Amino acid sequence: MSLRFKYFLSIMLFLAAAVTGSSASLEELIGAGRITELSAANPITEVQFRDPRPQLMPRDERLRRLINDATEALEPTLFVESLYRYKKPAASQKTWTEAERNALYNATLAISSLQGIEYFSVSRNRMHTFYETSTVIDGPDTKRPRPDPVYTTPPKELLIYARQKDLTFGDNIYQYTYYAYPDSLIFIQENLSSMSVGPIAVVRKNRLRSVVAVIDAGDSLLVYVASMAKAASFPGMNERVGRSFSNRAEAILSWFSKRADNALSM
């Protein structure tokens, strides 16, 4: 074998490794202490007001940049984070395959599957419907319903619009931006209409960002949810919205777990 061929082969192997990628360990992503907290399979949640800073964000450079961009744009007065460890089914407890990643991507694109999910309402002291309706639309002006998109190969970046009727914050239009990487999937929700509680506009348009990151970690998926908003300030309103966002994050994590169960068992 010639030296030139050996050199060519080593370059090709390096490029192949770069394309397929390898997952980081949970300890690399969140540290040993956080792993202990997550061992009970319950999410960790932080709620902050006024000048919030991420407390639970995994060590992922792409996620860090997206969170930084969002906080700089919003200057949020409310920041709710949740961190969750999803243990993969026994047959999938290794770095995800391309087919598994693509199945998870399409599972998170299924906006219509959010319809009817529930969260625990503190004010009602019972489970309550989160989204009464949830539909992909062709655009924020025409609002014509579209089926959930499905991709054989996920694009690196995708923008879609959705109309979602929230029984607390009303009928709203959202923009979703999806990012697909070899070792992670990230999507961001932004409100394109004002979110109101009764006659009170609590979060004006373009003043909410919800970021969901799904990071491959070998036998687990690390799921991070951050919702940040520049919210109206009324006595007791921040605390109410903070509790609501926290419980809604748990509903999203429950929804994701069910979607992941189906995607990884195929």
Image (tube, helix red, strand yellow):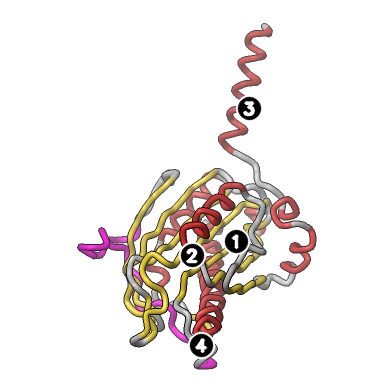
Q: Secondary structure at mark 4?
A: loop
Mark sitting earlier along the chain (1/2): 2
Magenta segment includes 242: no
Relative vertical location of residue 197 with respect to residue 36 in this rendering, above or below: below
- Near mark 3 (Cα within 10 A), the count class, few <14, some 14-19 or many ≥20, is few
Q: Which residue is mark 1?
A: 223
Q: Secondary structure at mark 2?
A: strand
- Of circles 3 and 4, the one toward us is 4
Q: CA distance from mark 1 to mark 4?
A: 32 Å
- Of circles 1 and 4, the one toward us is 4
Q: CA distance from mark 2 to mark 3?
A: 36 Å
Q: Nearer the viewer, residue 156 or 53?
A: 53
| Type of amino acid at the residue the image marks with label 4 | Pro
Please give left or right for residue 144 compared with residue 199 in the image. Answer: left
Residue 210, disc: 2
Q: Secondary structure at mark 1?
A: strand
Mark sitting earlier along the chain (3/4): 3
Relative vertical location of residue 252 with respect to residue 25 in this rendering, above or below: below
Q: CA distance from mark 2 to mark 4?
A: 24 Å
Mark sitting earlier along the chain (1/4): 1
x 67%, y 71%: residue: 44
- Near mark 2 (Cα within 10 A), the count class, few <14, some 14-19 or many ≥20, is many
Q: Which residue is mark 3?
A: 14
Please give left or right for residue 231 compared with residue 11 in the image. Answer: left
| Type of amino acid at the residue the image marks with label 2 | Ser
Residue 235, disc: 4
The location of residue 25, given as percent across then percent down, is 72, 50
| Type of amino acid at the residue the image marks with label 1 | Val
- Of circles 2 and 3, the one toward us is 2
Residue range highlighted in magenta: 124-148
